[in-house]
Image (cartoon, coloured by chain):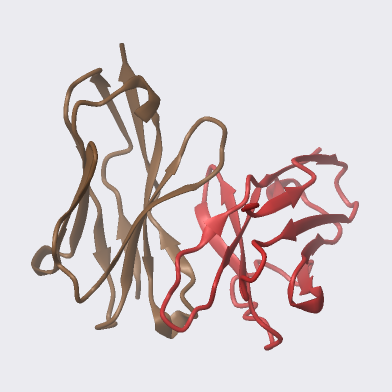
Chain colours: A red, B brown
Amino acid sequence: GAGVSQSPSNKVTEKGKDVELRCDPISGHTALYWYRQSLGQGLEFLIYFQGNSAPDKSGLPSDRFSAERTGGSVSTLTIQRTQQEDSAVYLCASSLRTGETDTQYFGPGTRLTVL
Amino acid sequence: AQKVTQAQTEISVVEKEDVTLDCVYETRDTTYYLFWYKQPPSGELVFLIRRNSFDEQNEISGRYSWNFQKSTSSFNFTITASQVVDSAVYFCALSEPSRYSTLTFGKGTMLLVSP
């Protein structure tokens, strides 16, 4: 079946602009995660959604970052007033559920470059 | 606090050599899960294996094998008879149900297999 999809694959923006990154999880997966991969910080957790519950936002680096998940499926990560340090690859993952730590499957990522 | 250490930043081998990638973890949880992911040059994280803390049996899958030792908090990954297609960055990761099963990743080991 189809895997996790993300769009756009690449995004170049100017400092100060807002960007939206989209994630389409695997059909039927109730848990959705956003991670960020950068040279300096490696792979780090950003935010997690489980079904219709309130998300765990503990990994978001600042209040410029927000995310939502509509209808328990597609998720959008929004970065407002982008800064150069936001340049990274943003990865989305989904899993069936988290009660017993199901395996997370990752999308191809969105490479964000802030000029 | 949870932590994953991959001490080997980069390993270079010649095709057909065996190679072992090390992973050491720290956790206070008694129930946890360990993962290995592969990230080829294309960038997508590919799931390789999941192991729970109660199952210390080693596992073999083709040329891949994993050695889980709770006594030393290690979960090492061996590739037998390496091939050029094995060239990638390999990540070890830890998941704890108490933390919504978010993944804590090591910094990764870049494996370069030359012909």
Say whether residue A91 is visible.
yes
The quarter in which the N terminus of chain B is drawn is: bottom left
Q: With respect to residue A89, does B103 lie above or below?
A: below
State the residue at coordinates (73%, 59%).
Answer: A24
Name the foreground residue: B115 vs B24.
B115
Name the foreground residue: B71 vs B60.
B60
Image quarter for residue B42?
top right
Q: Pinpoint residue A25: horizontal percent, then vertical percent.
A: 67, 62
Image quarter for residue B83?
top left
Say whether residue B21 is visible.
no
Name the foreground residue: B12 vs A30.
A30
Q: With respect to residue B61, does B59 lie above or below?
A: below
Name the foreground residue: B34 vs A47.
B34
Q: Pinpoint residue A6: horizontal percent, then vertical percent.
A: 72, 51
State the residue at coordinates (23%, 73%).
Answer: B53
State the residue at coordinates (64%, 71%).
Answer: A28
Drawn side of residue B88 relative to residue A17, left or right: left
Q: Pinpoint residue A65: horizontal percent, then vertical percent.
A: 76, 66
Q: Pinpoint residue B108: horizontal percent, then vertical percent.
A: 38, 45
